[in-house]
Amino acid sequence: MRRFIRTLLCLLPMLAPALPAWADETQLVTLETADASKEWLGVGRLNIGNYGFCTAAMIAPDVVLTAAHCLYDQKTGALLPMKDFQFLAGWRNGRAEAYRGVRAGVAHPGFNALDADRVSRVSFDLALLQLDRPITLANVQPFATSDRPRKGDEIGVVSYAKGRSEVPSLQEVCHVLAWRAGTVMMSCSVNFGSSGAPVFQIRDNQVRIVSVVSAMSDVNGQPVSLGVALGSTLPQLQSRLAAGDNIFPASKPVLLRSGQARSLNSGGAKFLRP
């Protein structure tokens, strides 16, 4: 897995002229009006105390999906306090459809916040947070999920990010450039704060989340985003959460063991204050 990703990123500058350019790819659109955002209210900003924010999406009335690295201090590897997390469903211009705290969470067991090779950790960069209360509003619905997209597939992303932290943005059409061993390389436009953003695909007339944004890079000036495929990991995390597992300690944070793409949480030194 590590060898594949390193090789892929090393080869991309040489392959850049051959990267496909899809005429149907769309630009980011700000979901500023109620009508524009009504289908995406299950996507929200995940505030993290004074550290900053990520993006998260509902997959159940009381469960949101995000990137695992959003849960940790990027300098120390310490798990951030559970009380600092707040999910703001459909956050737009100073108002959310619903505000919820977090009472439990689970992350991919293979994720290591202090792994210096941030590219290799992308395939483990997945976490679930259980909200302190379900969101049962009729206009705020959780999204269905699917295991993974395939090379060439048309996808889309809804995210908050640097310079657009108050209103979500939609890129309705971008594409999968490559996929292997849990890591998805995409042409989607992302920035700091987009960590945890849901990657959508329409299948059988239903919008499904197929990946979560983890990191970004570029190929000869062409932006490339990296995401984690849900695969078999999501059902495992759902089972752990349902069984009462909780990564958050009852008292003080636990330091992980120590262990080149940039993480996109808006964490550590890279956090953007909301």
Image: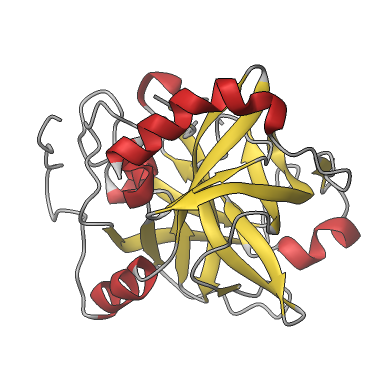
- Residue pictured at 45% horizontal, 24% vertical: 10
Q: Quadrant of residue 189?
A: top right
Residue 254 falls left or right of residue 267: left
Vertical side of 4 occupied by 141: above or below: below
Residue 82 falls left or right of residue 210: left
Vertical side of 243 occupied by 116: above or below: above
Q: Quadrant of the N terminus?
A: top left
Q: Nearer the viewer, residue 145 or 194?
A: 145
Q: Quadrant of residue 152?
A: bottom right
* Residue 31 visible (yes or no): yes
Percent across and percent down for residue 243 are: 21, 80
- Residue pictured at 67% horizontal, 40% vertical: 187
Percent across and percent down for residue 186 are: 61, 44
- Residue pictured at 77% horizontal, 80% vertical: 205
- Residue pictured at 58% horizontal, 62% vertical: 149
Residue 114 falls left or right of residue 191: left
Q: How is the image coloured?
A: secondary structure
Percent across and percent down for residue 169 are: 75, 44
Residue 34 falls left or right of residue 236: right
Q: Quadrant of the C terminus?
A: top right
